[in-house]
Amino acid sequence: MDEILIRDMKPEDVALVNDFFDAMGPETRALFNRQDCNRNGALRFCAEQDTNHRYWMAVLDGKMVGLVFFMQWSTGIPVLGIAVRDGIRGKGLGGKLIDYAIAEAKAAGKGGISLTTQFANLRGQTLYESRGFQRMGQYVNGIEIFYLLAFKTEE
Ligand SMILES: CC(C)(COP(=O)(O)OP(=O)(O)OC[C@H]1O[C@@H](n2cnc3c(N)ncnc32)[C@H](O)[C@@H]1OP(=O)(O)O)[C@@H](O)C(=O)NCCC(=O)NCCS
């Protein structure tokens, strides 16, 4: 894991992004990329670099092996998304990526982070709960849980 670099996603990363999403198996696609929504979001960010999003990628041996991003970055509680390449899961990269994103959100003065994950996504739930995310209840679509990580404020 030490050789993995986490860096900003740039306009020239289109081929790496497409390779990352092309390599996803059916389970990951069902959990993370239904109707190609997260691929399209990443490609849109490559093209536009818009300030309401932040995208970082993990790179190993010239390949994209992980992705972490925020939507609604201009709000006080941005929405996080994360994925690790099939085949290198369970080795700590998800933890490394989420810690990186949490540090960025804290450094930017955000109040916390929200996200949703499917009830079936036990690995994701283990990851989020290990970082202090709390279950707030069922999300409106009925198949996901809504999670919140609230940063403590000095009183
Ligand atoms: C969720 C995901 C990002 C986690 O990445 P990862 O690299 O596997 O994460 P880690 O290796 O850091 O492990 C995270 C935790 O899950 C635990 N875990 C591993 N396999 C597990 C399993 N099958 N069931 C439950 N927990 C599991 C690990 O022990 C670890 O917990 P710990 O930090 O308390 O030890 C990755 O599995 C993934 O990309 N999944 C598909 C896409 C996805 O679901 N994205 C999120 C959508 S909301």
Image (spheres, rainbow, N blue to C red):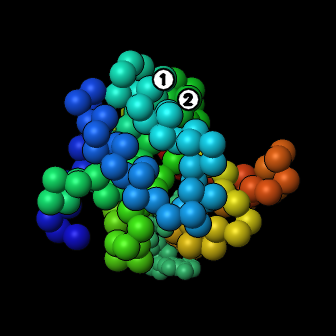
Does any portion of residue 136 appear in the rendered image? no
Q: Residue 119 at what x, y percent from top left?
A: 74, 66
Quarter occupied by the C terminus = top right
**Residue visible at 85% across and 53% down in the picture:** 142
Residue highlighted by disc 2? 72
Q: Residues within 10 Å of mark 1 (few under 14, many from 20)?
A: few
Q: Residue 82 at what x, y percent from top left?
A: 48, 53
Query: In the displayed structure, does residue 36 sit left or right of residue 136?
Result: left
**Residue visible at 33% across and 49% down in the picture:** 19
Residue 42, image quadrant? top left
Viewer-side residue, 26 vs 13: 26
**Residue visible at 79% across and 57% down in the picture:** 143
The answer to whether mark 1 and mark 2 are in CB contact below 8 A is yes
Quarter occupied by the N terminus = bottom left
Query: In the displayed structure, does residue 119 sit left or right of residue 58?
Result: right
Q: Which amino acid, mark 2?
A: Gln
Does any portion of residue 23 appear in the rendered image? yes
Q: Is residue 141 above or below residue 90?
A: above
Q: Residue 122 at what x, y percent from top left?
A: 63, 73
Q: Which amino acid, mark 1?
A: Asn
Viewer-side residue, 57 vs 112: 57
Residue highlighted by disc 1? 52
Q: Residues within 10 Å of mark 2 (few under 14, many from 20)?
A: some
Ligand 1 within 8 angstroms of badge 1 C-beta: no
Q: Is residue 151 above or below residue 123?
A: above
**Residue 137 tag number:** none
Q: Secondary structure at mark 2?
A: loop
**Residue visible at 70% across and 60% down in the picture:** 118
The CA distance from mark 1 to mark 2 is 5 Å
Residue 10, image quadrant? top left
Q: Residue 104 at what x, y percent from top left?
A: 36, 42
